[in-house]
Amino acid sequence: MMILENATVPIIVDAGVGTASDAAIAMELGCDGVLMNSAIAHATHPVLMASAMKKAVQAGREAFLAGRMPRKLYASASSPLDGLINK
């Protein structure tokens, strides 16, 4: 995050992306792009992995642009009645 917060140039991730969820996280954090090679080249089904990576990058970017809800230390039920047992 420190790099993203202080960067004055586009940030492209070029290592450590082994699967689609890694690419999505990079984009959700605000990176401008993700370079792909080994994760696709070494996949059992490279074409399928390339498709998954494309979708993950698109989804991660959209999530970043949409803006996430504030993080909380503790979770809370979305309804005050959730989790109650009627006797």
Image (cartoon, helix red, strand yellow):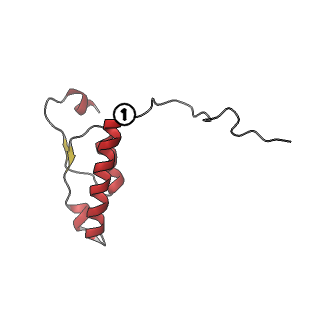
Residue at 71%, 35% in the rendered image: 81
Q: Position of residue 19 (x, y in %)?
A: 33, 58
Residue at 31%, 72% in the rendered image: 44
Above or below, 46 against 31 in this view is below
Relative depth, front residue between 25 and 85? 85
Residue 23 can be seen, yes or no: no
- Asked if residue 35 lies left or right of residue 22, the reply is left
Q: Position of residue 55 (x, y in %)?
A: 31, 55
Above or below, 46 against 37 in this view is below
Quadrant of the image occupied by residue 37: bottom left
Amino acid, disc 1: Gly
Relative depth, front residue between 35 and 15? 35
Q: Image quadrant for the N terminus?
A: top left
Residue on which the image places disc 1: 67
Q: Position of residue 83 (x, y in %)?
A: 71, 40
Q: Most extreme residue toward the top, as rendered?
A: 6
Relative depth, front residue between 47 and 74? 47
- Asked if residue 37 lies left or right of residue 45, the reply is left
Q: Most extreme residue toward the right, as rendered?
A: 87
- Asked if residue 7 lies left or right of residue 80, the reply is left
For label 1, the SS is loop
Q: Image quadrant for the C terminus?
A: top right
Q: Position of residue 23 (x, y in %)?
A: 30, 50
